[in-house]
Amino acid sequence: MELPKFNDTFLPIIDILRDGRVVPGRELLRLVEEKYYSKLPPELLNQTTKSGDRLLENRIAWGKSYLKKGGLVHYPQRGYVQITEKGKSAKVETISIDQLASDVIGFYKPEGAISEKQEIANSSPQDLIDSGIEQIEDNVKIELLQKLKLIDPFAFERVILILLNRMGYGEFIETSKSRDGGIDGIINEDQLGLEKIYIQAKRYTDNKVREPDIRNFIGAMSGDTAKGIFVTTSDFDENAKKKAKAAHHTIVLVNGLRLVELMYKFGVGVQVKNSYEVKALDNDFFENEDI
């Protein structure tokens, strides 16, 4: 007997949420454990990760996260989970765990990617550690982007300003607030304010930034401002990219993926959850004449 793998928790989670109610995340962990895993031996139930979290809860939480990536559940508000229409259509009685796992994991797994068994067989322990960390980082960035699209415009504005500050830019001077959850303003490229950069940030959920948006952005730049940064939580269409590239000004486009990469790199909206040490043999120690 062993603890369930994270993908073994997919169907139990869907079953608990099938009635459509909004469930607190912690309560979902408890309900899944009580209904499906309460009869496991105490020595299994009490297993912990290296960071001290209960291993079973950790795997259920990962199962919930993967179901969210696959669109079977969503987070209607912070700390709460609810099944989606796609999740409701997953028949617990007829669908196999392998089918559901394939559907969810296929959501983000690149086409042509090698199988998990092949990857393990062909990888060193260090490769597997690096791959695992990379996967966790990717998941955090996806959640970060989803969060940015949900927060209110004022919070989004603060996020952008905090990020720019962490990146070393100087004072921000707001020129106007737009109605679509964006900001317009000028930032100092350096702490002394020797050069100015015009910035515009748009919190879009689905719509891409189009060529007229870039044209208006360039037109709004004053004569003494030759550089601009356009930030969006979505993306830029091809005409918008061409317009920015052809401009006499230096225009940098930051889409949603690039934005969360910068936030992750500069520690904005994320925190260190666990740290692990990997130790290696110290040959210098044994070659020291003092021993």
Image (tube, grey):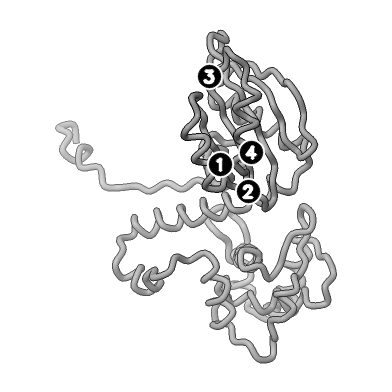
Q: Helix, strand, or loop for circle 1?
A: helix
**Which residue is at the far bottom?**
94
Residue 265 screen position, x and y as percent:
51, 38
Q: Quadrant of the N terminus?
A: bottom right
Q: Which residue is mark 3?
A: 226
User: Nearer the N terminus, badge 1 or badge 2?
Assistant: 2
Circles 3 and 2, Cβ within 8 Å, touching? The answer is: no
At 56% from the left and 26% from the top, the residue drawn is 228
Residues at discs 1 and 2 in contact (Cβ within 8 Å): yes
Residue named by callout 4: 212
Q: Kindly report the distance in space between the C-alpha atoms of the residues bearing marks 3 and 2.
A: 24 Å
What is the distance, in whole Å, between disc 3 and disc 4 at their CAs?
A: 19 Å
In the image, taking residue 178 as reference, residue 245 lies left or right, namely: left
- Across and down, in percent, residue 274 comes to 54, 48
Residue at screen point 65% across, 31% down: 216
Is residue 28 left or right of 21 when viewed as pictured? Answer: left
Label placed on residue 208: 2
**Structural crowding at the residue carrying mark 1, measured as other residues with C-alpha within 10 Å and reported as few (<14), some (14–19) or many (≥20):** some
Q: Which residue matches tag 1? A: 240
Cα separation, mark 1 vs mark 3, equals: 18 Å
Residue under the image location 41 percent in, 72 percent down: 116
**CA separation in Å, label 2 and label 4:** 11 Å
The picture places residue 248, in percent across and down from the top left corner, at: 48, 24
Q: Label 2's element?
A: loop
Residue 197 sits in quarter = top right
Residue 166 is drawn in which quadrant?
Answer: top right
